[in-house]
Amino acid sequence: MHYKSMPLRREFNINKIVTIHYYEFSKDFTFSGERHNFWEFLYVDEGQVEVAAEKNNFTLSQGEIIFHKPNELHSVWANRKTAPNAIVICFECNSPSMKFFHNKIFSLGDEERGILANIIKEAYNAYCSPLGDPEKNILIRKEDQVFGCEQLIKAYLEILLITIVRKGKFLTYKRKLSSTVKENNENDIVQRIIEFMKRNISTNLSLKELCHFFNVGRTYLTCIFKRRTGMGVIEYFRNLKIEQAKILIREGNHNFTEISELLGYSSVHYFSRHFKQATGFAPTNYARSIKIRV
């Protein structure tokens, strides 16, 4: 009897995983955005998130998933109403069938959600790196991995893609938002940072500290602050200090050394120099002008 082996056709071939995350976001979470040369999908497990993909903005609700193709600029933020949970997985796949996922949002059923749950389960079996930490983007293998866990991750991911293609139901751009959503989000971030600056007027905040505290990128924060206020982040903070210094001088309850200390300056000389640069007056001249006007 003659036999002939049959090579199996592969529609998807995923050989490399970049990251696997299960996030529990706060209701005011914001990720400023990035682009990279591999695929990424975001699935909303609970709650609701806003997503920007290139020039398009969307609202994703529980059970929905969006794919970002390689080198697509994308960002995500919570709506400040609910604290969402999301699965984010990045992977390399050069299969031509991946074109099906370009610019599409899908609503997943029980079958697909079960596959995603299996992927997360095997990720915990495979890696010791925390899946919920947004700053940990490198997977670290466990020394005592459960047998076959990484192969199952690959298999489940490929099964997920095949299942989605077979069902073929997607919500392409159906929840497209007006640009005002993103504008409102930017205004909200800027306003919260300004309020934070006011509460910490006596400190010397840095751009790095603000980015870390509000979980936003340096470039993103710089751009939206310039767009919304017309000046840089630290420049704005310094101007707040000067405006507070003017109030303190007019109240007359503190001398210049005390005011410089209250506003976090390293010395009264540095305070005086900065005040003159900002107002055109030395503090003593400003105080004198106030008395004359009174």
Image (spheres, rainbow, N blue to C red):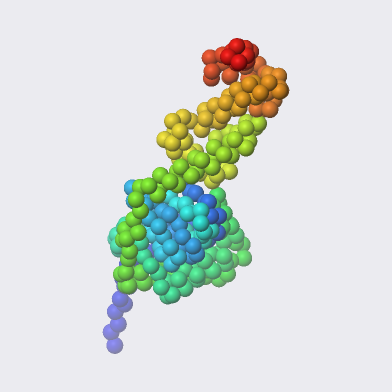
Above or below 144: residue 262? above
Classify residue 128 by image quadrant.
bottom right
Whole-percent x and y of residue 282?
60, 13
At horizontal 51% and vertical 40% (from top left) the residue drawn is 191
Q: Residue at x 46, y 29 (%)?
A: 231
208, above or below 105, in the image? above
Q: From the viewer's perspective, is residue 37 above or below residue 154?
A: above
Quadrant for the C terminus in the image: top right
Residue 197 place in picture, x, y as percent:
58, 36
Q: Which of the pair 184/29 is nearer the observer?
A: 184
Residue at 41 percent of width and 64 percent of height? 64
Task: Tell me the quarter of the image containing the N terminus.
Answer: bottom left
The answer to which quarter of the image holds residue 26 is bottom right
Determine which quarter of the picture holds residue 166: bottom left
Q: Residue furthest front?
A: 294
- Viewer-proximal residue, 178 or 113? 178
Residue 110 horizontal/vertical position (percent):
43, 75
Q: Residue pushed farthest bottom? A: 1
Q: Position of residue 290 (x, y in %)?
A: 60, 16
Please give the name of the residue rendered at 58% of the width and 19% of the height, measured from the top-left corner.
274
Q: Is residue 100 visible?
A: yes
- Please determine whether, in this image, residue 151 is positioned above or below residue 68: below
Q: For this rendering, which residue is in front, 45 or 257?
A: 257
Is residue 87 visible to us here? no
**Number of numbered discs on residues:** 0
